[in-house]
Image (spheres, rainbow, N blue to C red):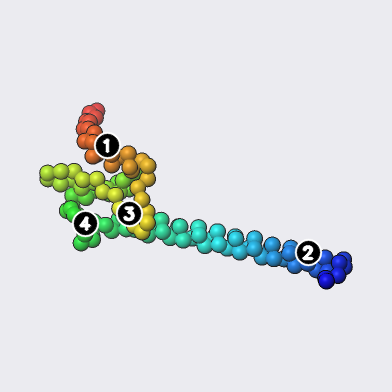
Amino acid sequence: MIPNSPILIILLSVAVFFLTMLAVEQRKRIKKLESELLSRSIVSGKVAEQLVPFLREFRGSLRDFRFIGSPIDGIIFGDDEITFVEVKTGNSSLTEKQKRIKKLVHEKRVSWTEVTS
């Protein structure tokens, strides 16, 4: 049987307090590391967007590619067709806006307008 002494209760309370503080600090470190990892992932994605026209897998002419950046990465202005290009790295996926743009393109709901001044 463990004696019910005030000293034991105080020691246990102090131990719980310090373990709680340690857990809070660990959560902060984990959150910071997750944030840094996300930031690095975003930066590597931005770099990939800029370099994709130079890759062997790129199906288009480098001189015909125009980088836009957002909401899609670029457009290839070919002789016989115009192609919208979105670069994804790792486990990234299309945003809702990009999905809507893709749907509009597949439905051939694309138009031309001229502005004269």
Q: Callout 2 environment at 10 Å: few (<14), some (14 to 19), or many (20+)?
A: few
Quadrant housing residue 88: bottom left
Q: Which residue is mark 3?
A: 88
Q: Among all residues in the image, which is located at the extreme top?
A: 117
Of the numbered discs 1 and 3, the one sitting upstream in the chain is 3
* Most foreground residue, 33 or 93: 93
Please tell me which residue lies in front, 44 or 23.
23
Instruction: Answer whether labels 2 and 3 touch (C-beta < 8 Å).
Output: no
Q: Secondary structure at mark 2?
A: helix
Location of the C terminus by quadrant is: top left
Upstream in sequence: badge 1 or badge 2 = 2
Q: Would you say the residues marked 1 and 2 are in contact, meaning their CB atoms lie under 8 Å apart?
A: no
Badge 4 amino acid? Phe
Sequence order check, earlier mark of 2 and 3 = 2
**Residue 14 badge:** none
Q: Which residue, given by chain and number where applicable, does mark 2 sit on?
A: 13
